[in-house]
Amino acid sequence: ASVSVTAYWAIMGFAPVKKGATIIIQGASGAVGGVAVQIAKDNGLYVIGIGNSRNKEYVLSLGADEFVAYNEEHSTSSLANRADIVLDASFGGKGAPSGLDLVKDGGYYLSLTAVPGAQPDKNVTIVSIQRTKDMTTGKALTYLSDLYQRKEIIMETALEFPLTAVGASKAHQAIETKK
């Protein structure tokens, strides 16, 4: 549930969400990014997902309007200045260096990890996502429960480990080796 709650507040808590606005989600195939795609679509946003080319069909199945693979040459250059909102949910903040290029002047760059330095030629609100006390788990879960009942929320499980000390160690190793 914490992944879904994080995705909810990342989309709903830090930038104005207006139907028809464009959001680019870096790390759209990840746990938070995948749920964020679904929440953004449910709120009428035009969603462009960025991820590894092997995850294209998965991200599009979540409802993304477009998909761009970061591992294809010059892939993100076509997205320059297209987003009203960029949500960086990429692993380890690897989306930060290119993220600001994607935001329109006057837009929002929201990051769950690394925050890039401001660009002097652009007016972009840069936010390091930190929940406030008003951003309750209960409010998020009420929305998420409703979304699940209306559409179901798709979440992919990458790997499973037993709930043991050895399993926890192996899960940690998988994270460190980016598996």
Image (cartoon, grey):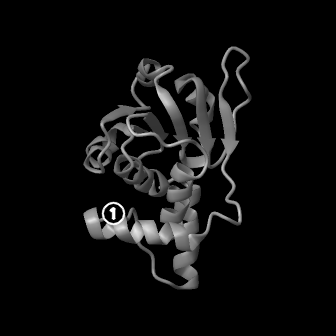
Looking at this view, name the residue that lies furthest to the top: 121
**Secondary structure category for the residue under label 1:** loop
Looking at this view, name the residue that lies furthest to the bottom: 164
Which of the 4 image quarters holds residue 76? Answer: top left
- Residue 90 left/right relative to 143: right
Q: Foreground residue, 111 or 138?
A: 138
Residue 118, percent across and down? 73, 26
Which of the 4 image quarters holds residue 70? Answer: top left
Residue drawn at x 59%, y 57% as measured from the top left: 176
Q: Is residue 151 visible?
A: yes
Q: Foreground residue, 60 or 52?
A: 60
Asked if residue 52 is positioned above or below residue 74 in the image, the reply reads below
Q: State how many labels appear.
A: 1
Residue 57, percent across and down? 25, 44
Q: Foreground residue, 42 or 115?
A: 42
Which of the 4 image quarters holds residue 101? Answer: top right
Dot 1: within a 10 Å radius of its alpha carbon, few (fewer than 14), some, or many (20 or more) residues?
some
- Residue 179 left/right relative to 127: left
Disc 1 residue type? Ile
Q: Which residue is mark 1?
A: 153
Q: Is residue 170 visible?
A: no
Residue 16, percent across and down? 55, 41
Residue drawn at x 51%, y 31% as measured from the top left: 84
- Residue 106 left/right relative to 72: right
Residue drawn at x 35%, y 47% as measured from the top left: 41
Residue drawn at x 57%, y 30% as measured from the top left: 99
- Residue 75 left/right relative to 125: left
Residue 168, percent across and down? 56, 76
Asked if residue 75 is positioned above or below residue 145 in the image, the reply reads above
